[in-house]
Amino acid sequence: PFVRRGSPSRRGAAKRSAGPSRPESRPHVPPPVAARPRRRPARRPRPGPGAQRAAKRDPRPPIAVSAEDYDTLAALVAHPSAAPGQALLAVELERAAIVESGLAADRVRLGSEVDYHDLDRDRVRTIRLSLPHEASIDERRVSVTAPIGAALLGLKPRQRFTWTEAGGKTRSITVLAVRNVG
């Protein structure tokens, strides 16, 4: 005889207490599959001092700097100055991947003309990244030791960078386009 669940019948109660007599028909759920590791590119840039350690926990976008620019900028950072972005530049050089030759044409480097969106001020600006002695507000040349110059270094289009200024204010920018001559 057919026994309904919840029926006060002793036979149904005995069956439930003894456990199911046949396997339950549950859908098969496969065990979770571990994510496959991403393949690394065949040629990787040489990491700067501390870049590998910082990349594991750093939410900032990866950056790359040519070996020539790295040498120039490392010499600049070695001489302390009152430039507001020099500390940020030192941190960025520390985590940068150094490329011996063939830095991608869409990476911001010394001399690059960059269109970026200042997310905090909701403005799009175009500047040329330069050394401190070449900087000129009138000619839209921004020093790499200025906070915005240090933030742009090594980025490529569609990358966003956020940093905290000396006064505690957080700033964010997104690179829109990069033009490099030569």
Image: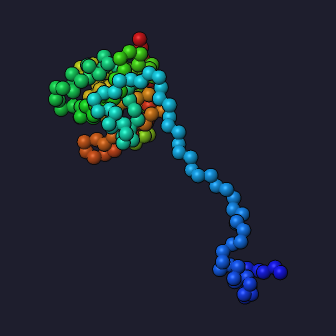
- Give the quarter of the image for residue 22: bottom right
33 up-or-down from 68: above or below: below
Residue found 28% across the figure and 46% down from its top = 168
Side of 37 where 111 appears, left or right: left
Using the image as rendered, state which of residue 5 and residue 122 is in the foreground: 5
Of the 4 image quadrants, the one containing the N terminus is: bottom right
Residue 31, above or below 44? below
State which quadrant residue 18 falls in: bottom right
Q: Residue 9: give x, y in percent of width and height.
A: 74, 87
Q: Nearer the viewer, residue 78 or 119?
A: 78
Residue 171 visible in the shown view: no
The residue drawn where x is 39% and y is 41% is 59
Toward the viewer: 33 or 102?
33
Q: The C terminus is located in which quarter?
A: top left
Residue 81 image offset from top left, x and y in percent:
17, 29
In the picture, measured across the screen, residue 93 lies left or right of residue 176, that is: left
Quadrant in the rendering for residue 155: top left
Q: Looking at the picture, how far across and down is residue 158, in whole percent? A: 48, 32
Relative image position of residue 80 (x, y in whole percent): 16, 29
**Residue that lies at the very extreme toward the left in this rendered image:** 80
Q: Residue at x 26, y 23 (%)?
A: 73
- Please give the name of the residue rendered at 50% of the width and 34% of the height, measured from the top-left corner: 38
Q: Name the colour scheme.
A: rainbow
* 158, 114: nearer the viewer: 158
Residue 79 can be seen, yes or no:
yes
